[in-house]
Image: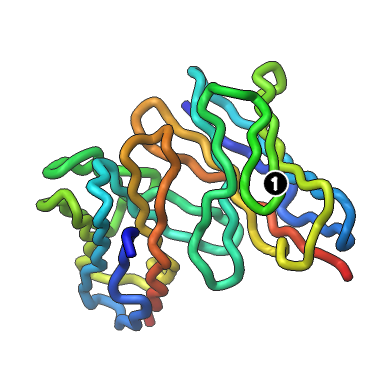
Amino acid sequence: NAGVTQTPKFRVLKTGQSMTLLCAQDMNHEYMYWYRQDPGMGLRLIHYSVGEGTTAKGEVPDGYNVSRLKKQNFLLGLESAAPSQTSVYFCASTPGTAYGYTFGSGTRLTVV
Amino acid sequence: AQSVTQLDSHVSVSEGTPVLLRCNYSSSYSPSLFWYVQHPNKGLQLLLKYTSAATLVKGINGFEAEFKKSETSFHLTKPSAHMSDAAEYFCVVTSRDDKIIFGKGTRLHILP
């Protein structure tokens, strides 16, 4: 089925470990986004990309890096995980901001 | 800068009664506006969108929203609540620099 696929769905990290979250979309969308969702905070934008090879910072970029080497993939990296990064992470894509967004099912990350 | 405010963090209604979830936005241009729904432990689903066509927008599952530029509002309504409507609802606005900005969410409780 066409859509946005996030891997992994669940992960537990120790403080200081690194990991990469993968977002893949097969809809040929130009724009891709990474959000984190915390109780009472809504979804906050971490980084986004308006096309292959481009990235930009969102509202809460510190502690995260991203890459968009291929149009269909948007990777979110944590170089040195901290307990404050415990959250649910959502990826989204769209052909343009007026069209609405397709979201992945989320990655639940716990940092202990 | 664009922003979105959801005026109620929790709303409780009885099954079969009307639903009103309030959203105000701030924007220096004419944005696109969306409502998304998130059921417990699920991803986000698009309910409806406004993109400068008709000001009354109909969405899925009987929901609709009215764009009022003079009041900078985009409130979500449904004539008759169903138990399956219990979820968290997010009002979303686009920004001129291709970001999408979420409100903090309104949790809708349906009383039997």
Tell me the residue at 19%/54% (across/down): A72
Judged left or right of residue A64, residue A111 is right
- Name above or below for residue A106 compared with residue A14: above
Q: Quadrant of the N terminus of chain A?
A: bottom left
User: Residue at point 55% right, 37% down?
Assistant: B49
Give the residue furthest to the front. A1
Q: Disc 1 sits on a residue from what chain? A: B
Disc 1 marks which residue?
A: B63
Of residues A17 and B54, the one drawn nearer to the viewer in this rendering: B54
Determine whether, in the image, residue A28 is placed left or right of residue B95.
left
In this rendering, the count of numbered labels is 1
Q: How is the image coloured?
A: rainbow
Q: Residue B55's image quarter?
A: top right
Asked if A72 appears above or below A52 in the picture, the reply is below
Check disc 1 and report its element: helix, strand or loop.
loop
Q: Position of residue B26 (x, y in %)?
A: 58, 26
Measuring from the top left, give residue B9's x and y in whole percent: 71, 53
Residue type beneath disc 1 = Phe
Q: Residue at x 38, y 62 (%)?
A: A104
Question: In the rendered image of this protein, does residue A71 appear above or below residue B38?
Answer: above
Residue B8 position, x and y percent, is 74, 48
Q: Nearer the viewer, residue B96 or A27?
A: A27
A55 or B35, nearer to the observer: B35
Picture coordinates of residue A62, whole percent (x, y) = 30, 53
In the picture, the quarter occupied by the C terminus of chain A is bottom left
Q: Is residue A65 left or right of residue B2?
A: left
Left or right, residue B90 beside residue A100:
right
Is A92 located above or below residue A17 in the figure?
Answer: above
Image point (55%, 54%), residue name? A42
Q: Residues within 10 Å of mark 1 (few under 14, many from 20)?
A: many
Q: Residue A21 sits in which quadrant?
A: bottom left
